[in-house]
Image: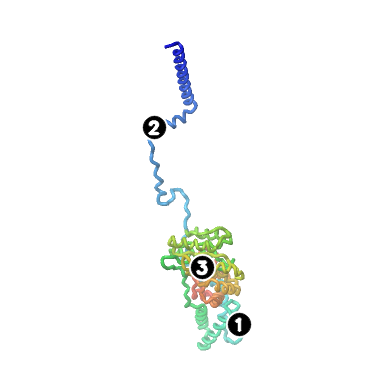
Amino acid sequence: MTLVTLIVLIAVAAVVLVGLVGLVATQRRRRVEHPAEDQAVTEAQSVPTREPEPADPGTLDGTPPAGTATLELERPEPAAGRLVRLRQRLARSQGGLGRGLLALLSRDRVDEDTWEEVEDLLITADVGVGPTQELVERLRTRLRVEGGQSASVPEVLREELITLVDPTADRRLGVRGSDGRPGVVLVVGVNGTGKTTTVGKLGRILVAEDRTVLMGAADTFRAAATEQLTTWGERVGVPVVAGPEGGDPASVAFEAVSRGVAEGADVVLVDTAGRLQNKSNLMEELGKVKRVVEKQAPVTEVLLVLDATTGQNGLTQARVFGEVVDVTGIVLTKLDGSAKGGIVVAVQRELGVPVKLVGLGEGPDDLAPFDPEAFVDALLGAG
């Protein structure tokens, strides 16, 4: 081995030795500066992988864990209790008409002037000219034939008023669908009649009958309508289908009925925008909503909501809506606040369809099926 070769080998050995010393020093410095990181790596390498902990058994079936606040759903009042309240409240607000008629017909002498007063009283109460003349003619005939004894006047008047209101009309709500599809109820009317509130209250009536209900917020032009309807639905566990503000009402109605079909709901209630009867384009749009909905399921009921205090203006609304959407039933709101109960008779004659529901106040269960006998008894102050 030459001297040059020996020197080269010694130099290489020196370089390797220096590298090893530097590596050891670096590892020692790392352990001092990052002890937690090294420990975590070591533990991850030495500890076996664990299966995830099972979920809280209290949440597996959808039940919130203990201590979680839940929304308690309300149980709406059944129809029987509502009818009792209908009689009581109408007797307080409507008794003036009946008492006035009884006072006139119980006079010792009922002459032509008296009959004119009877007619005036009925017309003032919004009964309408035609129905008023029919009622007066029947009363005159019966009281003449039966002698006009004061004891029979209340009975005769009650019977003739019930006939005038028409106890034979079918006042059942069309909420049953066919072929496995839900019943579809369109609720229509002008702004301010209590239309959206009526949808919410009607939902409560149907829930009390153990029906599954879904509501469609198709009044997209009034921002508060969707929020209002959602609140009504949350109180009794009824889902609400909504769309963007200012969106297409027909689209929302279509989606609501489509979802009702898919989920097997019993009834879909569709709240529509409050149309002004003199706006033909908006009325045409309402017709479009009905046509679009029927691509999913037939409309089984079209309820027109009228404010009982509007009198003859309500009849104008009824006439126009009837031409557009084939109204099948009437809801009279604020009847307890009106002294003109004759609107029941007048609007039925105008449309040829019955009053099916009446609103009696601001409470959540203050919407009741209309009962002709209870209504007449209330008119006569017999509540």
- Say whether disc 2 or disc 1 marks the residue closer to the N-terminus: 2
**Image height check: is 196 above or below 382?**
above
Distance between the Cα atoms at labels 2 and 1? 104 Å
The reply to whether dot 2 and dot 1 touch (C-beta < 8 Å) is no
Residue 92 marker: none
Determine which residue is flagged by label 3. Answer: 291
Distance between the Cα atoms at labels 1 and 3? 48 Å
Q: Residue furthest top?
A: 3
Classify residue 274 by image quadrant.
bottom right
Which-is-in-front pick, marks 3 and 2? 3
Amino acid type at circle 1 is Glu
Q: Secondary structure at mark 2?
A: helix
| Location of residue 51 in the rendering, given as x and y in whole percent from the top left corner | 38, 41
The reply to whether dot 3 and dot 2 touch (C-beta < 8 Å) is no
Q: Residue at x 51, y 70 (%)?
A: 302
| Location of residue 228 in the rendering, given as x and y in whole percent from the top left corner | 55, 60
Q: Residue at x 58, y 76 (%)?
A: 126
**Image height check: is 240 above or below 149?**
above
- Say whether disc 3 or disc 2 marks the residue closer to the N-terminus: 2
Say left or right for 1 vs 166: left
**Image height check: is 112 above or below 197?**
below
**Image height check: is 306 above or below 30?**
below
Determine which residue is flagged by label 2. Answer: 46
| Location of residue 79 in the rendering, given as x and y in whole percent from the top left corner | 46, 67
Distance between the Cα atoms at labels 3 and 2? 70 Å
Q: Residues within 10 Å of mark 3 (few under 14, many from 20)?
A: some
| Location of residue 8 in the rendering, given as x and y in whole percent from the top left corner | 46, 15
Q: Secondary structure at mark 3?
A: helix
